[in-house]
Amino acid sequence: MSSALYANPWFSALPDDVREAMLRYAEPVRLRRGEMLFRQGDAPGGLYAVLRGALKISTLREDGREAILGVIEPGTWFGEISLIDKLPRTHDATSVGACELLVLPHEAFHALMERAVFARAVASLLATRLRMMYSMMEDATLRSTRARVVRRLLLLARGDASMARNPRPRIPVSQEALAMMLGISRQTLSKELKLLEGLEAIRIGYRCIELLSEERLRGADQAG
């Protein structure tokens, strides 16, 4: 089993017997690059965990352009909202590259929800994601473009949805994808990234951004 699952703070905090039950009932899923796991409007199929690769959570704007809302990386469980309210999927989930996942069928999920410890854990997961959503809404409406870029980089450094305890030095995201996450032009993003690079807070690489100094990056947030 992928060590990424046990590195995820949410999953690792579950009791041993709950983790074992989840893994016992989970089924493997493999996706090719660009293949969709589910589309907006699909019926809920289960609770998913990424083992290898990554998926983008996205939707289409009114003009037909794609808006990337988040990236789901190894170790992250997701898809619980539709299982709880039994309503259709809210967004598209598409593999960025070859991807391996687990799916906990909805029957097994609801059986585990009868256990208080699992239900509390799912509530905690939802609360964490709700806080993240409010933070992103605040960024979009109240903060400068530079501050939004900085704060999204800091979020991505901890795995976006997986929220690792410590930031990683290499953020695997292209400038195109980052611009789509922020809803800004590639040119505007490039200008902000070059400024942060000049401050020696980051280094721009090929389809990645290296985090050189979290302190300098946070300082640029305050200055922006």
Image: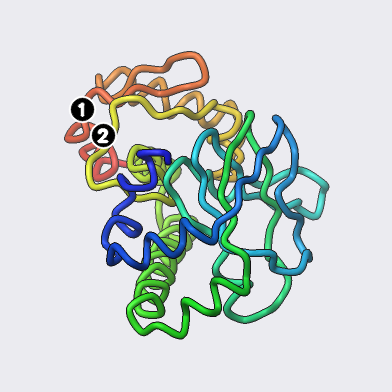
| Colour scheme employed for the rendering of this structure | rainbow
When asked about the image quadrant of residue 81, the answer is bottom right
Q: In this view, does 223 lie above or below 176?
A: below
What SS does tag 2 mark?
helix
Question: Closer to the camera, 198 or 87?
Answer: 87
Horizontal side of 76 relative to 66 (left or right) equals left
Q: Residues within 10 Å of mark 1 (few under 14, many from 20)?
A: some
Horizontal side of 56 relative to 167 (left or right) equals right
The residue positioned 20% from the left and 31% from the top of the image is 216
Residue 203 picture location, percent across and down: 35, 17
Q: How crowded is mark 2: few (under 14 residues within 10 Å), some or many (20 or more)?
A: many
Q: Is residue 95 above or below residue 106?
A: above
Amino acid under disc 1: Ser
Q: In this view, does 42 lie above or below 72?
A: below
Name the residue carrying label 1: 213
Say which quadrant the C terminus sits in: top left
Amino acid under disc 2: Leu
Name the residue carrying label 2: 217
Horizontal side of 166 relative to 106 (left or right) equals left
What distance separates the C-alpha of mark 1 from that of mark 2? Answer: 6 Å
